[in-house]
Image (tube, rainbow, N blue to C red):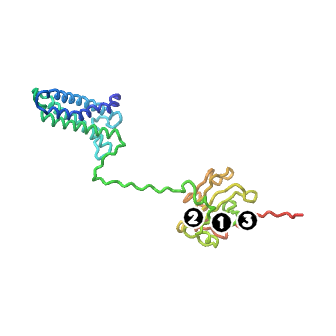
């Protein structure tokens, strides 16, 4: 049965070929007169070949439907379905094939009636033969559509076209805070690093866009659209070291601040601060930023808490 099921596509070509060739022979056999008998033979030959091919296609199609789980056990036909989906098309394909097999009986009877040598095959054979050929071609077309699922299935014009929802916009900062990485293009709010206990006792510098610079210096509330970035360096023996620390970003979106913490490569000895993460990128409502949000609930922190611990100057030794 598995071999027969796999041969369904091959066997289905026989009835389709009959549907294509039989109408020409039927029209040719309508001429009365001597020498018409060979066209009877052609019509009858094509008719019997088409019937045998159709029966073989029906048997192999039924086997294929069961082998691929398209026809439930205990059923002859697939489950009926409405609409224009694959299930509905499979059911119609089976109905058309069965109708073609039933229509073959009167068509073959009309083509095999006793005729005199000078008579045509007859209008009845022409009408029934053309109807049978149309069913064979319709069955072949429905099978072709089933075998090529990429081919669009025609949709009736009364069905409204479904408008697909637009794809959500791609977040350009999904992998890294791009604007914060370009902090050197902003205005530096102090000339040299200061040590900040609130930011892990790192040495930080503040950078701001024009909307934030004047308000930051004056200690006023940051306006909407303000962007402040803190770049940082790890401490080394009480002075700024060479190891870069994380970036701290504050952006005012309306009345509420949006915070971001970005550390592209966390040193091994500092990973306890990030819960073991080797790369930290926290933003928005990330739970890691709860302490930051508590300090910056109104935007900028209290100016009185700003660090003024600057880089210690190297004492010049007196020269002789």
**Relative to 116, is 288 above or below?**
below
- Give the farthest residue toward the front: 34
* Mark 1 burial class by Cα count in 10 Å: few <14, some 14-19, many 20+: some
Q: Residue 154 vs residue 208: left or right?
A: left
**Mark found first going from the N terminus, 2 or 3:** 2
Mark sitting earlier along the chain (1/3) = 1
User: Mark 1, mark 2: which one is toward the viewer?
Assistant: 1
Q: Image height check: is 254 above or below 21?
A: below
User: Looking at the rendering, in which quadrant would you find the C terminus?
Assistant: bottom right
- What residue is shown at x 32% (from left), y 41% (from top)? 145
Q: Quadrant of the N terminus?
A: top left
**Marking on residue 251:** 2
Measuring from the top left, give residue 171's x and y in whole percent: 51, 56
x 63%, y 72%: residue: 219
Residue drawn at point x = 73 percent, y = 65 percent: 310
Q: What number is the disc on residue 303?
A: none
Question: Is label 1 in a helix, a strand or a loop?
Answer: strand
In the rendered image, residue 108, in percent from the top left (x then y), is placed at 17, 31
Reading the image, the residue beneath label 1 is: 188
In the image, which is nearer the foreground, mark 1 or mark 3? 1
User: Which of 74 and 200 lies nearest the eye of the viewer?
Assistant: 200
Q: Nearer the viewer, residue 33 or 219?
A: 33
What is the CA distance from the residue labelled 2 to the residue labelled 3? 26 Å
Q: Which residue is mark 3?
A: 310
Front in this rendered view, residue 223 or 269:
223
Q: Is residue 142 above or below residue 243?
A: above
Tag 1 near tag 3, CB within 8 Å? no
Q: x, y (%) of residue 181?
A: 61, 58
Is disc 3 placed on a helix, strand or loop?
Answer: strand
130 sits left or right of 78 in the view: left
x, y percent for residue 290: 59, 60
Q: Residue at x 28, y 50 (%)?
A: 156
């Amino acid at each position: 049965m598995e071999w027969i099921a796999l041969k369904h596509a091959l066997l289905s070509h026989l009835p389709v070929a009959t549907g294509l060739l039989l109408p020409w022979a039927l029209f040719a056999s309508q001429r009365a007169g001597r020498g018409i008998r060979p066209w009877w033979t052609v019509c009858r030959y094509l008719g019997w070949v088409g019937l045998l091919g159709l029966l073989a296609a029906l048997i192999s199609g039924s086997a294929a439907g069961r082998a691929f789980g398209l026809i439930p056990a205990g059923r002859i036909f697939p489950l009926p379905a409405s609409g224009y989906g694959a299930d509905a098309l499979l059911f119609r394909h089976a109905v058309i094939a069965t109708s073609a097999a039933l229509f073959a009986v009167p068509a073959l009877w009309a083509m095999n009636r006793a005729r005199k040598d000078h008579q045509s095959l007859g209008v009845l054979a022409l009408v029934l033969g053309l109807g049978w050929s149309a069913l064979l071609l319709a069955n072949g077309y429905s099978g072709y559509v089933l075998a090529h699922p990429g081919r669009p299935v025609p949709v009736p014009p009364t069905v409204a076209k479904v408008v697909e929802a637009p794809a959500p916009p791609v977040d350009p900062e999904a992998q890294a805070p791009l604007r914060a990485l370009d902090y050197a293009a902003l205005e530096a709010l102090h000339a040299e690093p200061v040590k900040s206990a609130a930011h892990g006792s790192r040495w930080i510098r503040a950078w701001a866009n024009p909307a934030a610079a004047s308000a930051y210096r004056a200690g006023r509330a940051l306006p909407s659209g303000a962007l402040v970035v803190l770049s940082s360096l790890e401490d080394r023996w009480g002075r700024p070291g060479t190891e870069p620390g994380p970036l701290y970003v504050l952006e005012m979106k309306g009345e509420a601040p949006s915070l971001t913490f970005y550390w592209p490569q966390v040193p091994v000895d500092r990973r306890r601060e990030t819960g073991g993460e080797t790369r930290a990128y926290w933003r928005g409502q990330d739970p890691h930023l709860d302490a930051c949000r508590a300090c910056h609930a109104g935007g900028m922190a209290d100016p009185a808490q700003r660090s003024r611990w600057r880089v210690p100057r190297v004492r010049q030794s007196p020269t002789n």
